[in-house]
Image: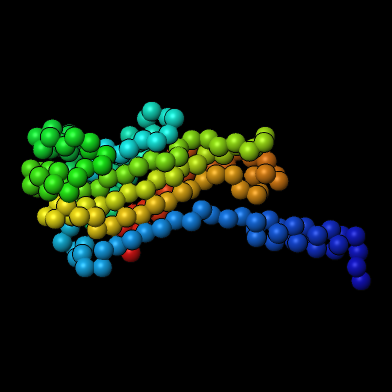
Amino acid sequence: MLTKKNIRQGIFCIFLLALAACTTTAPSSSWHDPIMDFGVVETVAVMPFENMTRDNLAADRVRDVFTTMLLSSGGVYILPTGEVMRGINRAAVARPVTPSPEEVMKFGAIVKADAVITGTVKEYGEVRSGTTSANIVSISMRMFETKTGRIVWSASSTQGGITAGDRLLGGGGQPMDIVTVKAVNDIIDKLYK
């Protein structure tokens, strides 16, 4: 027998299913060079990231989180930031956020790195839609082999943003540090796949 309580519960379940169906995650991509042996990469230099956002410190924040999390993975040794800057100066890298293959090889020889990682922070901060707001991070990264200067890995990730649940139920999304960690974790997972 259908009661008002059963009907309400049924409608609520249908609402939750519809809400879950509306929630999407941004597509992300990854590419690995099929002939590259990533097992030989022991020392990595993380270059300063390019910042395409309005937040002047976004690239430094994301780079710091990425460097710390990659180092804590135990898979590679990350050169200290000061050593990377010294190498950039000695190799006369004109634009460290987008080095040329020749600059990558020269830099790698100076700092004794097997690979160089560059990154771009495309979005970082709050997005708004009507009265709803949430935090978002969108990053892309590339790894260069220092012996040849060629790109051997590339990946991107976007995390956060306004969901259908935020629009319907309100809410401000997740804190910026959690969204940043999620995006960096996604990138590192793609590196080790």
Closer to the camera in the image, 98 or 158:
98
Residue 11 image point, x, y percent: 81, 60
In the picture shown, does residue 56 fall above or below 143? above
Judge whether residue 165 can be spotted in this image: yes
Residue 77 image point, x, y percent: 19, 50
Closer to the camera in the image, 193 or 128:
128
Residue that appears at 22% across and 38% down: 96
Quadrant in which residue 46 is drawn = top left
Judge whether residue 44 can be spotted in this image: no
- Outermost residue, top direction? 56
Residue 139 image point, x, y percent: 39, 45
Residue 12 image point, x, y percent: 77, 57
Question: Quadrant location of the C terminus?
Answer: bottom left
Q: From the viewer's perspective, is 44 left or right of 125?
A: left
Quadrant in which residue 52 is drawn = top left
Closer to the camera in the image, 53 or 159:
53
Question: Quadrant location of the N terminus?
Answer: bottom right
Quadrant in which residue 13 is drawn = bottom right
Q: From the viewer's perspective, is 42 left or right of 67?
A: left
Residue that appears at 25% across and 48% down: 117
In the picture shown, does residue 167 fall above or below 131? below
Residue that appears at 59% across and 44% down: 162
Closer to the camera in the image, 182 or 149:
149
Residue that appears at 11% across and 55% down: 147
Q: How many marks on residues? A: 0
Visual colour scheme: rainbow
In the picture shown, does residue 3 fall above or below 43? below
